[in-house]
Image (spheres, rainbow, N blue to C red):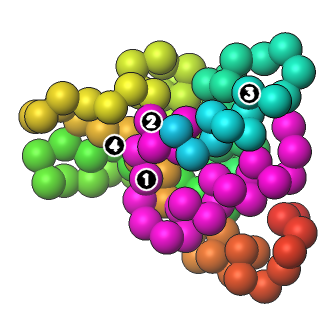
Amino acid sequence: MTEDLKRAVLELGVEDAYGLWEVLWKLQPQATTEAGAPARAIAADAVASLLNKGLLVVQLEHNDTSTIVSGMDAQRLLENASSWTEPLAGEGAVRVVATPAGRDAYYSSDVLP
C-alpha cells in the first residue's frame, strides 16, 4: 500500500467524518492499480494503519449519536463487509475522522509518520 493511499484517507478524515463506503469510493481508482488485492482490502489496510498510528478514529453513528469505537471492535468493523456499503435510511454508519494528531500530521508534513 502506498503512502498516497494513506494520505488520501487521512485527507478525508481531516475534512470531515467520512463513511467507510465513501473512503472506498475515493480510493477505488487508486486501489485497483495495486497488485492482486481487492480495493476494499487495500482501503481497510490504509484505514487500519492510520488507526494504529492514532491518526484516525472509527465512529459508529446511529440516530444522530456518535460513538468512538476502538481496539478489536474497530478492527471487526473494518473486517465486516457491510461496514463498507452505504447504509440505508435509519441504519447505522461506520465513519472515520482524524484525531488531533492526524490533523497535525496532515498539515505539518508531506510525509506521514
- Quarter of the picture holding the C terminus: bottom right
Q: Quadrant of residue 100?
A: bottom right
Instruction: Please give the range of residues in magenta.
Output: 1-24
Question: Majority secondary structure of the magenta segment?
Answer: helix
Instruction: List x then y, in percent, for residue 33.
Output: 81, 30
Which residue in the structure is indicated by mark 4?
Answer: 60
Q: In the image, what residue type sits under mark 1? A: Tyr
- Which comes sooner in the sequence, label 4 or label 3? 3
Q: Nearer the viewer, mark 4 or mark 2?
A: 2
Which residue in the structure is indicated by mark 3?
Answer: 32
Instruction: List x then y, in percent, for residue 84.
Output: 45, 28
- Which comes sooner in the sequence, label 3 or label 2? 2
Compared across the picture, whether 39 is left or right of 18 comes to right
The image shows residue 11, relative to residue 40, as above or below, that is below
Q: Secondary structure at mark 2?
A: helix
Q: In the image, what residue type sits under mark 2? A: Trp
Q: In the image, what residue type sits under mark 3? A: Thr
Q: CA distance from mark 1 to mark 2?
A: 8 Å
- Which comes sooner in the sequence, label 4 or label 1? 1
Crowd tier of the residue under label 3, counting other residues whose Cα lies within 10 Å: few below 14, some 14–19, many 20 or above: some
Q: Which residue is at a point 32% across and 31% down the rendered structure image? A: 86
- Which comes sooner in the sequence, label 4 or label 2? 2
Pointer 3 with pointer 2, Cβ within 8 A: no
Q: CA distance from mark 4 to mark 2?
A: 13 Å
Q: Nearer the viewer, mark 4 or mark 1?
A: 1
Magenta run includes residue 37: no
Q: Secondary structure at mark 1?
A: strand
Instruction: List x then y, in percent, for residue 111.
Output: 89, 69
